[in-house]
Image (tube, rainbow, N blue to C red):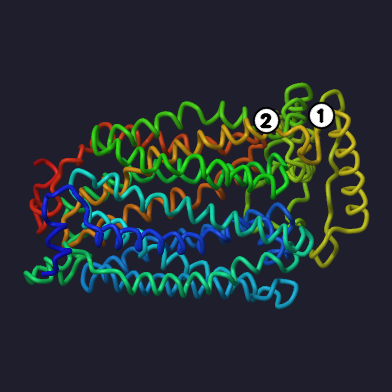
Amino acid sequence: MSTLADNALDQDPVMTAEERKVIIASSVGTVFEWYDFYLYGSLAPIIAKQFFSGLDPSSAFIFALLAFAAGFIVRPFGALVFGRLGDMIGRKYTFLITIVLMGTSTFIVGMLPSYATVGVVAPAVLIVLRLLQGLALGGEYGGAATYVAEHAPQNKRGAWTSWIQTTATLGLLMSLMVILVTRNMVGEAAFADWGWRIPFALSVVLLGASIWIRLSMSESPAFLKMQEDGKLSSAPLTEALGQWKNLRIILLALFGLVAGQAVVWYTGQFYALFFLTSVLKVDASSANMMVAISLLLGTPFFVFFGTVSDRIGRKPVIMAGLLLACITYFPLFKTLTEAANPDLAKAQRLSQIVVSADPETCSFQGSPIAREIDFTSACDLGKRALAQNSASYSNVTLPAGSPTTVRIGDQTLTPPIAKLTAAGDRFDEASVAAISEFRKQLGSALGTAGYPTKADPEKINKPEVVLILTVLVIYVTMVYGPIAAALVEMFPTRIRYSSLSLPYHIGNGWFGGLMPTIAFAMVASNGNIFYGLWYPIVIAAISFVVGMLFVRESKDVDIYAKFLYWHPNRMGK
């Protein structure tokens, strides 16, 4: 066995230069992979216009978010495929496969023709590429967390694995910064037309650097020990999922830790960005810059809370972050609205909007496949127009057959009822005229009531916005900083890659990755711009309760000695 492996299995708390080298190399490669994955999310509004222009604007944005979420949906499957490989052939070579798959897919996105050029082929290929990215990422995190943890001394495992936790945020930060630089270089109009492709094309350079870094890495010492002793698992998925004692721990990890961590992560970093640009109408450059600053300020707290978890435990830090998120999300986002778009906040206070309608005439506004012509009732047309103006409204239920009205302050409007042509593929001329006139009246009424069409750059309280965003990022660091160490400590070495990857990617891929899509659909359906926050609050609250009652502390677990091989009673000993 190598000296590196011997040192890692030793209980000496001092990390060698070689161990630091491979841990840093692992982290840098993972940053590049997250950069590739999150470029799409950072450019979702532009992606919607480029690849989903066949839908109306609201549906196009939700569908673009669904394509963003597609990469998250398949992450658990990537965890199964690459987790099995990682437990059978090693962590290092699995890393190489995932980075090549991710980098290549990202580069192709930058070269992909738009909907205007090739029609439905464009969004179809885009979704396939997002699925490939999701599969790659599904194999990345479990390997990185396992690899670093198996190099780290026992009493510094939280601190060292927290560097892996910074990589997702640093990847997002890198994507935002590259986008900002490109925007400023080519101009806003050119960026929206073709300049958005440049950050994707740059991924080919990062791919080359990542492959070089990954080739220089040594294999995990714990894996080498298993290999040397002939104790590798021949069927890691069967062991991980086929035995109730291990499956039970996977479920506890998912519902007691990762699901809550995931929604807090995506609320604090992605939903906050989407909320600024799509709801509060802050210009994209300003929003990206403020989010980038908050990420810079908040990122060191990943290592801080990872280190704290080495002293007081993983569970207290994670549970505190979940609880704070549940308690403060609503006031924080309301304060964010006041700071980023004070005119909108004032209008909502002084001139509330109320839609009164027979509920039987109202459709689900959050449908991701809806077309403009699918909304023909007065209720639908009224709510659609309000949603497209980011105007928050409340609903009043009227008796069956009652006409729909939209009250904005002191003004009351009556939306039209649309009719389709005989072919059923568009509104008839009279309906087009009536809808156009209603929207003009609505725009005028909103303007009179003080509702802005976009956030006034001169009125944005940027220091306060950055402060709120930083608080949200700090919540992320509390729940995410210690999570890698906690998951590693829950599973034995021979099936660790497979076991921890599954709950992590179900939690972050499904509960977290779908968070922006579900939240915006909830807002579009309900009308209240803050209504989508109920999704992360409820999920975080469930994880808090399950975690407090059933998840045990693990910081003192010796992952090298006690759990090097299968030990069915590890949770209680």
Query: The C terminus is located in which quarter?
Result: top left
List x then y, in percent, for residue 428.
88, 59
Q: Is residue 115 left or right of residue 410?
A: left
Q: Is 191 situated left or right of 415 in this image?
A: left
Point out the frontmost of discs 1 and 2. 2
The picture places residue 51, in percent across and down from the top left corner, at: 67, 67
User: Residue 506 is drawn in which quadrant?
Assistant: bottom left
* 158, 396: nearer the viewer: 158
Question: Which residue appears at 70% of the width and 52% of the height?
Answer: 58
Using the rendered view, name the quadrant where residue 357 is placed: top right
Between 196 and 177, the one lying in front of the other is 177
Q: Between residues 76 and 401, which one lies in front from this camera angle?
A: 76
Residue displayed at 57% across by 43% down: 293
Q: Relative to 268, is 139 above or below?
A: below
Disc 2: which residue: 339
Q: Residue at x 22, y 53 (%)?
A: 15
Residue identified by numbered label 1: 408
Residue 286 shown left or right of residue 408 in the figure: left
The residue lying at 35 percent from left, 70 percent from top is 214
